[in-house]
Image (tube, rainbow, N blue to C red):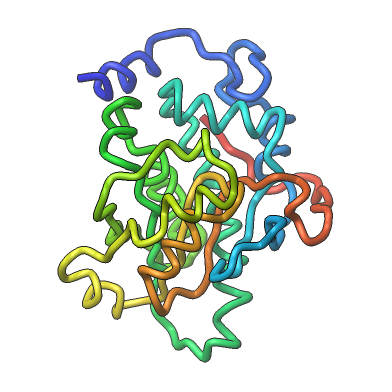
Amino acid sequence: MRGWWREIAGLVLPVACGGCGRARTQLCEECGRALYGRPPGRVRPMPEPPGLPVVHAAAPYGDAVRAVLLGHKERGVLGLARPLGLALAGAVRAAAASSAPSAGLGAGPLLLVPVPSSRRAVRARGHDAARRIAMAAAAELRRTGTAARVLPVLRQRRPVSDQSRLDARQRLENMAGALEVVAGGGRALAAGRAVLVDDLMTTGASLVEAARALPGHVGAAVVAAPPSSFTRPPSPLGRRAKYSE
């Protein structure tokens, strides 16, 4: 019921920009540029945890990007999934392009594998934020000529603590051995090239565990990561694909 109400409310209530609060638009042009107006970059947290896959992020986490991510995840502004998906699609392309040549991988659709949230978190929020963004990213990839679909084959095999209260070492310990591939997931993964996806990377602990549970992936992509984790500062591209409501 909560998800249904949010979908209806998004159609009938006045909207404001998810990044800056400007009235009468769900995402203004300036905040859109902050989210997907730069080329995706390679990100590496410091310290970099062992086992972290190659990760690409669409945007530095802060200001408007932070507001959009929190608006979608915590406040249930579901319409923001589309521009977040546009940003994630760019990071997925970068991850696949940088990994495929060295891995010797052949043709096949991109399989976007979301890092799963706990059932408790999904119930509390009323939706699965990472999966919803992944669906939007796959739709954007298909729209622009890249075969892609979401393949939610990872699940939590045991409860984990709230990561927000833990430091980097504690997060690694909290996530170690927490994920597994669902029954039959291996066969589904054989049909394409798996890219791990999430909305945000901070310490990298969740992606380390996801990579352990999912051998054979071609890298990872996230919407945002801390500015200090970019291996080089992302530079503006000017106008890119524009999100339209």
Q: Say which residue appears at 28% left-offset and 33% top-offset.
A: 120
Residue 239 visible to the viewer: yes
Where's residue 167, x and y in %?
A: 58, 43
Q: Say which residue appears at 38% left-offset and 10% top-offset.
A: 12
In the image, 178 versus 84, the foreground residue is: 178
Q: Determine whether, in the image, residue 78 is placed left or right of residue 43.
A: left
Q: Determine whether, in the image, residue 59 is placed left or right of residue 216.
A: right
Q: In which quarter of the image is the N terminus?
A: top left
Toward which corner of the image does residue 216 lie, by quadrant? bottom left
Where's residue 34, x and y in %?
A: 72, 38
Residue 86 in the image: above or below residue 47: above
Toward which corner of the image does residue 112 lie, by quadrant? bottom left
Residue 87 visible to the viewer: no
Where's residue 241, x and y in %?
A: 64, 47
Where's residue 17, x and y in %?
A: 61, 20
Q: Determine whether, in the image, residue 162 is placed left or right of residue 167.
A: left
In the image, 43 versus 112, the foreground residue is: 43
